[in-house]
Image (cartoon, helix red, strand yellow):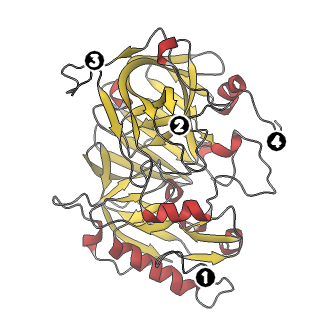
Amino acid sequence: MDPTLVFPVLLLLAIASTTCVSATRISMNLVHRDSIVPFNPTTPTTHQTSVTDYTMHMRSSLIPSSNSIYYANFSVGTPPVPQLAVMATGSSLLWIKCLPCQPCSPTPQTPLYDPNKSSTYAPKMCDSYCVCQGFDQCAFNKSYAGAPRAEGTYGTELVRFTAWHDAQKNLDKVVFGCCRKTQDLPGESLMTGVLGLGTGSESILKRIGPRPKFSYCIGDPRNPFASSRLEIGEGATLQGVWTTYVTEFGLYYVTVERMSFDGLTLDIPSSAFVKTPAFDTGVILDSGAQMTFLNKAAYYEVERTIVSYMEGSQWKRVWPELAEHVVCYGGKLSEVAVWLPVLGIHFAGGAELSIDAYGTFMQLADQDAFCLAFGAADSTQSGSIGILAQQNYNVGYDLVHKRVYFQRSACLNLP
């Protein structure tokens, strides 16, 4: 397959996001953003972040984030309209862009869904599901810190997960958000919505049976054609070391006990990771964001440790004027990766994420520089572990026993 070709939508659905289904299983290859557009391995890939986008990241943690790397592929409606939605554990609602939508714009790969042309669409009218004020349909309004709001109405629709060999899993009357007002984020013109995998009442996970579970395995984000997968239902891989989670507002809060660098525990107070009743603090898992955001006490220690380690090296800091705690270095991240030690996040129960250079830093696409892929969360915000920190891991969620499993994996090796 020539990676420089742009595939038509039907071929994209058939090959780029193959989905295999049994009665209680949905299995799909996640679509890397750079596999959809012409790919030139000699030029910076679009999953890399520009200076502008990086400073946007630093101002707030986005759930889901701008510059999302992976999309889940499915179709909505009758006739089916293909979707490329951000896979987000930091959100519970499935929402998509609907016509008329302002200022949304379709692309050849992602046409917009028109509920008026679907025979299986039904609006959610004002009843026990919602309280309406001056409207006869249930309205939704999703706000993401530092990102445009998504506004529209609730409806129900047929959602199809289709395989190249014509097997399919249909979920009818799925509650979803029909978004009529939003704004494309930088680098997100292909995104048609969000596939929420949180535990809220609106989550599609409520439709997969009495023992819901799912898993995703994230390969090398630098390679658009590396294997990355999402399994929902019986095909989910729950292997490796697990830690427990608690839920609030549909989010997965995990207990971080400590962090380490080069095998040495960092000097971070345990209170930096604790969720308190008074504030929306603690640490969540967020597959919809690239970067990881930590409580300020934790972030400042990570920053201090990294900066101290890099002192005296050939890589010099750049752009200190952007913000006080923006940590960027001139050069290629690939050159640093061979000697940078592992940064560790250690959870209760013994589970851990070992983060290499490509999860610790992110290369900038428009500059010969790389920046720390961590930021400081506001004092009243949850910390969040983004997808770059989870690469090369299979992460499994057992919603019955409230466990998250972490297993280091080359995703091709999964069953």
Q: Residues within 10 Å of mark 3 (few under 14, many from 20)?
A: some
**83 w.r.t. 401: above or below:** above
Instruction: Give the CA separation, mark 3 to mark 2.
Output: 25 Å
Which amino acid type is marked by label 4? Thr
First in residue order: circle 3 vs circle 1: 3
Q: Amino acid at mark 3?
A: Met
Q: Compared to 315, does 286 lie above or below?
A: above
Q: Position of residue 392 (x, y in %)?
A: 57, 54
Please indicate whether residue 12 sits to the left or right of residue 128 in the image: right
In the structure shown, which secondary structural element does the residue marked by tag 3 occupy?
loop
Q: Give the labeled residue for mark 1.
A: 317
Looking at the image, the residue that sits furthest to the left is: 278
Q: Is residue 217 visible?
A: yes
Q: Which residue is mark 4?
A: 4
Q: Position of residue 229 (x, y in %)?
A: 56, 39
Q: Earlier in the sequence, mark 1 or mark 2?
A: 2
Provide the secondary structure element on which disc 2 rests: loop
Q: Name the amino acid type tagged 1.
A: Arg
Q: Which mark is residue 103?
A: 2
Q: Quadrant of residue 192?
A: top right
Q: Residue furthest bottom?
A: 312
CA distance separating discs 1 and 2 = 38 Å
Residue type at mark 2 is Pro
113, 350: nearer the viewer: 113
What's the residue at 40%, 71% (across, down)? 259
- Quarter that holds the C terminus: top right
Check disc 3 and report the residue beneath it.
Answer: 125
Does label 4 or label 2 sit earlier along the sequence?
Answer: 4
